[in-house]
Structures are given as structure tokens and as C-alpha cells.
Image (tube, coloured by chain):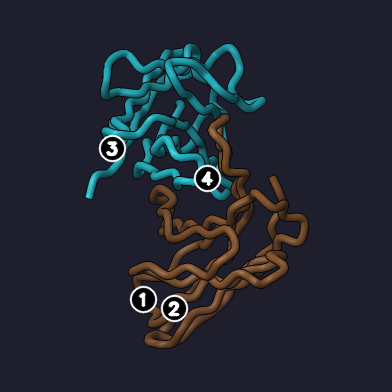
Amino acid sequence: DAKTTQPTSMDCAEGRAANLPCNHSTISGNEYVYWYRQIHSQGPQYIIHGLKNNETNEMASLIITEDRKSSTLILPHATLRDTAVYYCIVRLANNQGGKLIFGQGTELSVKP
Amino acid sequence: EPEVTQTPSHQVTQMGQEVILRCVPISNHLYFYWYRQILGQKVEFLVSFYNNEISEKSEIFDDQFSVERPDGSNFTLKIRSTKLEDSAMYFCASRRGLSNQPQHFGDGTRLSIL
């Protein structure tokens, strides 16, 4: 599975959009990009995933560059409850195992 | 919304004792996982389980660890003889059968070895 690179930490003002970048320059054609977050040692919470196209759900939007070497998770109106560590994970979509390899993630602090 | 549930939320055990951590995955899911997170460190994969057998395991998952799906709903992680370094949060996860579907995690069991 491809390695990802994320900034260690970011701040965001409450109510503003939080844009979290991720580099995955060695991603292969059949690897998906997954985003999870972890709030204060709770279990990782699934946010969104995508392959090539941009994706949106009730939590966030995922923008994947055309060359697929990087992506951005967008929380459109960040709240204090969005303060968490955000993980970008690239995983080969197959039915063999499918483990997730977590990095250090980005610690997002949403400030009033 | 269905969720993965784990019990107990906190387990305190003497070193050398056996411990069983329990998980109830989401009901129509077919793939099951255990991860652990030592305090202040990354979430680490331990083992994946499908069709009643281990499909992949990490170096951490040595002979002291075992997993079982004893019935149609529970998924357990057993540590046979606990060590101090087994102290960690243990997370169970499950996912549906489709290959790109995400894993969904429980809130974990905090295991403290004394």
C-alpha cells in the first residue's frame, strides 16, 4: 500500500472551511484514498473515500487531483467538535485482508 | 445507524493472566479486524479475519494472540499470557464484503496490565 504524507498539525477557525492535504505520490491505479478521524482516543471514525472522482457526503468532501498523487479533505464549516487527528490512508481495494496502515495523521484544532 | 460494539470498555488484568476482548461487528459485515494503539502512538494493525480464518496478521500478532468468531455475532481477541507491553487501546473493526467498502471501528477496550 502506498505511503501518505500529511502535515503534523493545522488550525482552523470555527465556522470556516478546514482543508486538510495529503500527498500519496506512489499511489497505484487500483488504490483508494480513505479518510478517518480519531477524537481523543476514541475509535477511528470513517469519513469518506474515493478512487478518482471527487466525493461528497454529509460529513465532508474529498478532492483528488487528476494525477491522483494528492488529495484534500474539506470540512465545509468546521465546528469545535471537529477537533481531532485526521488520517489519510491509501489502500488496495481487494478482498484479501484489507488492513489499514495508519500514519501519524494531521492534528486539527478548531478554535472559536 | 448500526455500529461496532466492544466490551468491556476498560479491562485491568495482572501480568501473566489471560484476557479476552469482545466485539460485536456490524451484522451484515464479513471482514473483521483487530488493531491496537499504545498510548501516544499510532494505530497498529494486528489481524484480519474472513470466512472463519485469519487472512492476514502482523508481526505483533504472535502465538500469545488468538481470534475467534464463536457464534454468528461475536468476534473475540484472546491474549493468553499478558505482558506489561500489551497495555493499549484495542479496536475492533468490520467491513462489508465489497472490496472498496470502508472499515468501521468500535470505541475500543482500554487494556491495562499491572
Q: Depth check: B97 or B82 in front?
A: B97
Indicate the amino acid at tag 3: Thr
Task: Name the side, left or right, on which B23 lies relative to B112.
Answer: left
| Structural distance between the alpha carbons of marks 1 and 2 | 5 Å
User: Mark 1 and 2 residues: CB-CB less than 8 Å, in contact?
Assistant: yes
Same chain letter for marks 2 and 3: no
Task: Name the side, left or right, on which B72 lies relative to B112.
Answer: left
Q: Earlier in the sequence, mark 1 or mark 2?
A: 1
Residue holding disc 2: A110
Residue holding disc 4: B39
Q: Which mark is residue A80?
A: 1
Circle 1 or circle 4, nearest the eye = 1
Indicate the amino acid at tag 2: Val
Say which element carries label 3.
strand
| Structural distance between the alpha carbons of marks 1 and 3 | 26 Å
Crowd class of label 1 (few under 14; some 14 to 19; many from 20; radius 10 Å): some
Indicate the amino acid at tag 4: Leu
Could one spot residue A34 in this view of the protein? yes
| Structural distance between the alpha carbons of marks 4 and 2 | 23 Å
Crowd class of label 2 (few under 14; some 14 to 19; many from 20; radius 10 Å): many
Q: Quadrant of residue B95?
A: top left
| Structural distance between the alpha carbons of marks 1 and 4 | 23 Å
Circle 2 or circle 3, nearest the eye = 3
Circle 4 or circle 2, nearest the eye = 2
Colour of chain A in the image:
brown
Q: Position of residue A29 (x, y in %)?
A: 69, 53
Q: Position of residue A90 (x, y in %)?
A: 62, 52
User: Mark 1 and 3 residues: CB-CB less than 8 Å, in contact?
Assistant: no
| Structural distance between the alpha carbons of marks 2 and 3 | 28 Å
